[in-house]
Image (tube, helix red, strand yellow):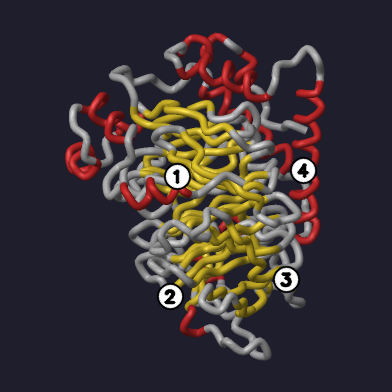
Amino acid sequence: MENLHNHRSITNANTGPPRGFTDIFRREFGFSHPSAFARRFSASEVLVKSLNLYGKLDGHGGCVNAVEFNSTGDLLVSGSDDRQVMLWNWASKARLLAYPSGHTDNIFQTKIMPFSGDCRIITSAGDGQARLGLFREDGGVETTLLGKHHGCVYKLAVEPGSPHIFYSSGEDGFIQHFDLRSNSATKLFCCYSSTGKQTPSKIGLTSIVIDCRNPYYFAVGGSDEYARVYDLRKCQWVSSRNSDQPVSTFCPRHLIGSNNVHITGLAYSINSELLVSYNDELIYLFQKNEGMCSSPSSEDLKNTNEPQVYSGHRNAQTIKGVNFFGPNDEYVLSGSDCGHIFIWKKKEAKLVRLMIGDQHVVNQLEAHPHIPILATCGIEKNVKIWAPQGNDIPPLPGNVKEIMEANRQGREDRSRVTLTPDVIMHVLRLQRRQTLAYIERRHSRADIMSDDDDAEGYLLGRLDGDASSEEDSPGNSRDCNIS
């Protein structure tokens, strides 16, 4: 474990942007303060199109599954299959500390608690545990088990502005409430699928998000087609009573009753719009008034507006997140099994940027809280930072249609299979193991470069202005099936 004194001096001394951060904006845009940048450039499409690789944060020994900025945006935390938590000054590309999380399986979520002096990091993992990493005054880190689910815990949700309270959702279907002041965990309820079914079944949950504009509301998604929204004020804090009573549900009409889709990612916009990403399907944006009751009638369905749709990517191999980008969430972000980062205009669902973000799969994308900086991670063993750079605005790659068509064809081929929720969760775990086994075999061959060197050449060969390399290479329009 690395010493924390450097971390403390950085966080205590820096009231403004970290060194390196200011240099980026002075060099590229002629001024340094991020608020001035936001006022002048706002959500410019030109700015988004100029996003390019700023740097890589190397240090993990396995796939990186989680990235998160702190509330001020000067620090970034990451978690990996190596079960290490790492804290970074992303602007200088410097690792400030690393510590063993105490988890016994792959880390899927890392978050820095707000208003905690950046000294409390919560994590969740494939072992079902939610844990706390507390930075001590002597430079050490104390890790504590806070609670446990049966099955993986992919996501945690922090109560906006609270240094103490957060929630977890697990494959066992339970929502748990945590309060760091007591290091206690409370099971709120278990999520069941009862819509149109005689026998309710547990929903294995993969995502939970809180509406920052209305923090009493949170949404969960998992192994069926519905995103469910709950009101915390209506949750019974007594385990003997059932609080599984969503105030609203969201689902595209054509997916209602489907047995072969499930949700991998959710995100709320600052206007309470709900973004939902489906496994091997598409991404949908719902307005807050477009929800249905838990058992919608045919009349309800008839009066429901169709959501905005974002397509072109492929989300089959892993549990992928989805996110917004821009000062007012003007853009939608997703990774893909083909290794690309997709950025669409939110209103028109027009694809405006397509970047190679990983040799294999891009899993998570995290927007900086104040400026147009993006952090991504995937199967490779690093975090990538993306920033507006240079005056040349690259067009979409010449083979964009082939990439999107390969993704569409892969979805259609697989959509013929019908799976139960339990089988869906098993298949996800199996796919992940197969993907990692494939990569281990590939990089164990003597005639193949190391993962980092290979990845660097693959990325930089396309990000250094060589647009023709993507256009001329038919291999880039590959199907996204890895295993």
Q: Would residue 472 appear left or right of 147 to someone viewing this image? A: left
Q: Which element carries disc 1, helix, strand or loop? A: helix
Residue 30, quarter of the rendered image: top left
Which is nearer the N-term, disc 3 or disc 1? 1
Q: Which residue is mark 1?
A: 6
Q: Nearer the viewer, mark 3 or mark 1?
A: 1
Q: Position of residue 51 (x, y in %)?
A: 38, 29
Marks 2 and 1, the one that precedes in the sequence: 1
Q: Residue flagged by tag 4: what amino acid is it?
A: Gln
Residue 300 seen in render: no
Residue to which mark 4 is pinned: 431
The amino acid type, in three-letter code, at marker 1 is: Asn
Residues 390 and 49: in front is 390
Residue 123 spot, x, y in % from top left: 60, 58
Cα separation between marks 1 and 4: 40 Å
Identify the element where label 3 is drawn: strand
| Residue matched to label 2 | 216
The amino acid type found where label 3 is placed reads Lys
Percent x, y of residue 76: 47, 45
Name the N-terminal-most of marks 2 and 3: 3
* Of residues 290 and 355, the one drawn nearer to the viewer in this rendering: 355
Nearer the camera: disc 4 or disc 3: 4
Q: Residues within 10 Å of mark 2 (few under 14, many from 20)?
A: some
N-terminal label among 4 and 3: 3
Question: Which of the two discs, 2 and 4, labels the residue nearer the N terminus?
Answer: 2
Real-space CA distance between mark 4 and mark 3, rounded to the nearest whole angstrom: 22 Å
Residue that badge 3 annotates = 202
Between circles 2 and 3, the one closer to the viewer is 2
Outermost front residue: 138
Q: Quadrant of the C terminus?
A: top right
